[in-house]
Amino acid sequence: MIADLVYKFLPYLTIAGKSVVIYLFIIAAIRIFGKKELSQLSVIDLVFILLISNSVQNAMVGSNNEVEGGIAAALGLFIANYLFKFLLRAFPGFSHIAQGDKLMLIHDGQLITENVRKSMLSVQELEQVVREHGVKNISDVDLAVLEVDGNISVLSKDYSHRTVQRKKKPQTTHNP
């Protein structure tokens, strides 16, 4: 009886398990390739995300195209995401490994070139971010920090003016 029940649900447990493995792989890949991907979503990034999701879909559900297979994959992802976020909050060491640390990019108007290189942002991209925060030049920035969530915080005017660049929606047209 129990063996029949396990046999009946085994394909769905397999789908959920494979979905969790893909989820963990994508988190690790994003961590390795940098936070910039999280904060600067361009058309190219959107296409990349769509292609990644399409390419890993078959690895998660295989040839199963039934509603139950999709529910099993989604349920596995929801549970993995819930547990992952719980672990991030409960264990600071795990959070440090999974998300990294904030990264100071500018201090007292000076680029911290090593950290800019680590962030995989170009100087031009950083200049654009500074302007988006209402600051004319990098030399006018007191402090710019790439936060662990991919946002960039900028302090200027003797540390009295603080702005945070929120994650952007994809830009689909160019308006000069």
Image (tube, grey):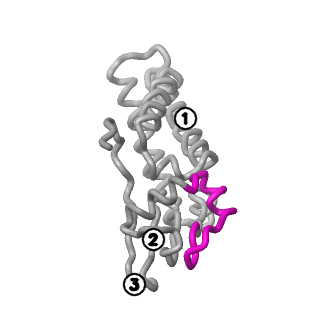
Residue 94 picture location, percent across and down: 60, 61
Q: Residue at x 58, y 50 (%)?
A: 34
Residue 154 disc label: 2
Residue 116 picture location, percent across and down: 62, 60
User: In the rendered view, does 69 fall on the left or right side of 141?
Assistant: left
Residue 162 picture location, percent across and down: 39, 76
Q: What is the count of numbered marks?
A: 3
Q: Secondary structure at mark 2?
A: strand
Q: Secondary structure at mark 1?
A: helix
Visible residue check, residue 54 = yes
Q: Quadrant of residue 5?
A: top left
Q: Is residue 106 magenta?
A: yes
**Residue labelled with disc 3:** 160
Q: Residue at x 54, y 30 (%)?
A: 18
Identify residue type, mark 2: Val
**Residue labelled with disc 1:** 22
Q: Secondary structure at mark 3?
A: loop
Cα distance in 3D space between marks 1 and 2? 35 Å
Give the class, few, some or many, for how many residues have Cα within 10 Å of label 2's Cα (few <14, many ≥20).
many
Cα distance in 3D space between marks 2 and 3? 10 Å
Identify residue type, mark 3: Ser
Cα distance in 3D space between marks 1 and 3? 43 Å
Magenta span = 105-123
Q: Earlier in the sequence, mark 2 or mark 3?
A: 2
Closer mark to the observer between disc 1 and disc 3: 3
